[in-house]
Image: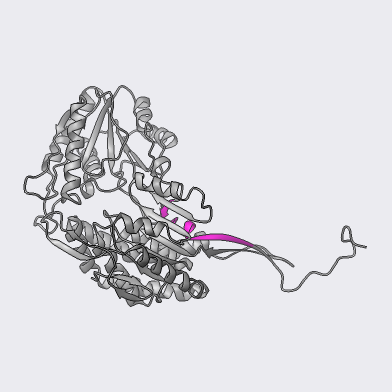
Amino acid sequence: MSNKILINGEWRDGSGASFSSFDPSTGEEIWSGNSATKSDVEDAVGAARAAFPTWALTPIAERIAVMERYRDIMKRDGEELARLISRETGKPYWETKTEAAAVAGKVDISIRAYDERTGVKETLSGATTGMLRHKPHGVMAVLGPYNFPAHLANGHIVPALIAGNTAVFKPSEMTPGPGAFIIERMVEAGVPAGVVNMVQGARETGEALTGADVDGVLFTGGAKTGLAIHKQFADRLDVILALELGGNNPLIWWDTDNVDAAALAVVQSAFLTSGQRCTCARRLFLPEGAAGDKAIEALAKLTDRLIVDQPFADPQPFMGPVISPKIASGLERAFDQLVERDGEAIRNLSVRDDGSAFVTPGIVDVTRSSAVPDEEHFGPLLKVWRVGDFDEAIARANDTSFGLSAGILSDDKAKWEKFLALSRAGIVNWNRQTTGASGAAPFGGIGASGNHRPSAYYAADYCAFPVASMEGEKLLPIAADQVGVK
């Protein structure tokens, strides 16, 4: 795993200040290197710009062959990547193995998506042939998140390169290691110099990258940063933006015979990955009365049984720490503020006193609260409302500026159909966790959750633009009855 930056096929030290990443379960330093300065970023973008024409002219079969070699290398090194992700994020090893597998699996999915959504198609036949083709944009800036530091960035880079773009990638400053890991393997696979470049650093490096001469910005992260990027390019119609910005996701639990199964779906929705998935349920809606009481009791008992431990512990934990002690403290403050605003603590969210980033999952009933902020608490914090009827549950579920994921747990198919029709989200699940999503489907949302550019299978859409052509091998002669011609 390199601690350098990659520019035009050359690994070199960043010219900026040094920084490090740490294991959030132990505090151990995992990665240390120098950040990229504005000059470094400009060099990286310049290298990508220079490499673009040749890569765009490279036959699609050859670009795919390079990516297939990368896929095979990632399968070979998947266990090593999984262990690195666990050490740098604190996620359980069982979970990071699925992330490493998804990195390799993204290649075949992206090849299919390119062919299906942005391939070459004939639209008209005869003396004139109509053709639909797709062309790459140019240089793509990719800014990765810390929660899935390999998979989500890889999900932008792979389809971008297949389409013929070049890329400059900045991993999250909290998880630089997995980003460097996948880029090293792309180089090993034969991605030409300048086609993929990588810069490391924090906010200043990211701002330098979005401020450089790029043709697209592909960002996964928080809504505030996404909104800032959106505003930055308000007068740049030439730059394509794909923004995936999380959500304040609702889950309705209504009319289920199997209470324990429903409680498990809630736990998987709210606390998987220590609540650090953008699709995690943040708000749970239950009926008033005995049914709601029974649901809360089952949920609380199951939450008490969850194992919270280091990523390689035996038995394997359900969840590890959050990404940093600072984030852990912020979540604890957010929970305490909800309780102070007339919330009732069902299970306390508290931080371990050993200096690590471990927190216990928190559940708070905010039914009586007068002011619950519409924000994404990125961690294992679940807010509960008790409502009088199903229509109120749907109305409250939609009472958010976000719109990424939503779910309903119910044995009543009519309630599912009504919720599906009226819910405002890009991912809507029935009797499954809100965190369940497929790479073979679009992934994204509306409102403050993004800018209508879903990723995953639909990444092909923003990595190339359509070009319609009317074509003939020879010019058509002037017809005798041509209007306006003597």
Locate the C terminus by quadrant: bottom right
Region of the chain picked out in magenta, as a range: 454-468
Q: Position of residue 254 (x, y in %)?
A: 29, 31
Q: Quadrant of residue 420?
A: top left
Q: Please report the residue visible at 21 percent of the width from the left and 36 percent of the height from the top.
A: 334
As drawn, 431 above or below 287: below
Is residue 466 inside the magenta stretch? Answer: yes
Q: Residue furthest left?
A: 354
State the count of labels: 0
Q: Quadrant of the N terminus?
A: bottom left
Q: Is residue 162 left or right of residue 13?
A: right
Residue 144 seen in render: no
Which of the 4 image quarters holds residue 480? bottom right
Q: State the residue lying farthest toward the right.
A: 486
Locate residue 323, reporting x and y percent.
Answer: 20, 51
Residue 36 image offset from top left, x and y in percent: 31, 64
* For residue 87, side relative to residue 76 (left or right): left
Model colouring:
one colour
In this view, 115 is above or below 266? below
Compared across the picture, whether 135 is left or right of 302 comes to: right
Q: Is residue 122 magenta?
A: no
Q: Quadrant of residue 304?
A: top left
Q: Position of residue 51 (x, y in %)?
A: 46, 73
Can you see residue 63? yes
Nearer to the camera, 360 or 41? 41
Please give the name of the residue rendered at 14% of the width and 62% of the height, measured from the top-left corner: 29
Does 136 appear above or below 235?
below
Given residues 21 and 293, the one toward you in this image is 21
